[in-house]
Amino acid sequence: MTAITVLQAALEAENAAIYGYGVAGAYLAGSGQAAAIRDWNDHNEARDTLSAMITQLGATPTAAAAFYALPFPVHDARTARALAAYLEDGVTRAYLGVVAVDNLRLRTFGALAMQAPARRAAFWRGRTEPFPGLIS
Amino acid sequence: MLLASAATVPLLLAASGCRSSDAFDGPDPLAGRPRPGHDVVVLQAAIAAEEALVALYVTVTSAGSAAGSELLKSLLAQHGQHLARLRAALVLPPGTVTASPEVTVSAGFASPGATASPGGTAGAGGQADGRDVVTRLHAAERASAAAGVRRLGTVEPALAQLFASIAACDATHVAALAALA
């Protein structure tokens, strides 16, 4: 597993989250929608960070897909919150993959980067999980 | 065919003029207990730190006066899960002295017999209540999350991922406790 592979996987997860928050946000209102917008912005920043890291390693960042299949139908605020938690779980897992590489700086980056999506997943789910990114 | 039981091996070695240290490529297994590997040392430190955190939660939840006690019990239960998984990753020879006394958490509630780990960073002891308790737990969780990330740099990937996941969980606890404060 190379550094570029794991960073591309994290970028793909961020791109999926950006797309998914666009869907979830449409079904949320008030503070929920404000939180979705805040998280969407965070994912855009993370995408830019990952793209810059991949470019620095001499590779081309994978472009976002035009469309991502949703894991389940989203039609109201409840399912929108569930989608947000699902997306954050995916991003958390992807950054945990970065922790598996040998490079110390990348490991540390992955470990720190997975904390924000783990927190956001807990927010949307309404509870914390014992092992974010791992199978409990 | 020559069959040798474990008891006859030393005799055979002696008869052939070999010492036990000649038969193995590495440290003499009869010379004493080998020093634990790096991952084992790091894992033992992680277990001791998790025990200290559990002990702090046990102290404050036993006092029963903390705000958000249901939340605190739930966070304690998750630390119990961390401890179990860390301990499961550590297999030591029988008779090995562990770093700290046993701390247990059952069914999400503090075990009455649980004890604080000596030298623990959590500073358990005495009864505190309300905001003070939350502040202490918040600081302990934050320190634990940071220590987990520091710890993962030099260990095998699977152990590094376990440390990273636990540190991320601690970070979610920080946020949950901040909401209580």
Image (cartoon, coloured by chain):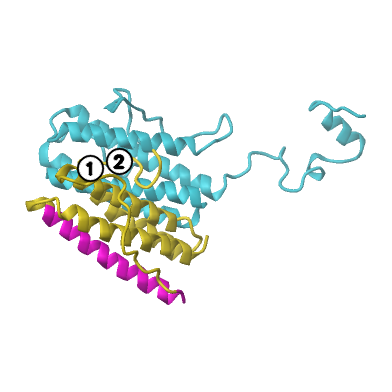
Chain colours: A yellow, B cyan
Marks 2 and 1, Cα distance to the nearest angstrom? 9 Å
Secondary structure beneath dot 2 equals loop
Q: Which residue carries the number 1 mark? A: A125
* Residue A51 falls inside the magenta stretch: yes
Quadrant where the image shows the C terminus of chain A? top left
* Depicted A45 relative to depicted B106: above or below: below
Instruction: Tell me where the magenta segment starts and ends, as one range.
Output: A33-59
Tell me: B146 left or right of B85. Answer: left
> Residue B29 or B158: which is nearer the viewer?
B158
Secondary structure beneath dot 1 equals helix
* Depicted A10 relative to depicted B40: above or below: below
* Residue B132 falls inside the magenta stretch: no
Q: Check if mark 2 and mark 1 are on a common chain.
A: yes
Q: Residue at the top extreme? A: B112
**Badge 1, how many Cα within 10 Å: few under 14, some, many 20+?**
some
Name the residue: 37% across, 61% down.
Answer: A12
Give how far across and how far down residue B18 sits, in percent.
87, 41
Q: Which mark is residue A129?
A: 2
Name the residue: 12% across, 35% down.
Answer: B67
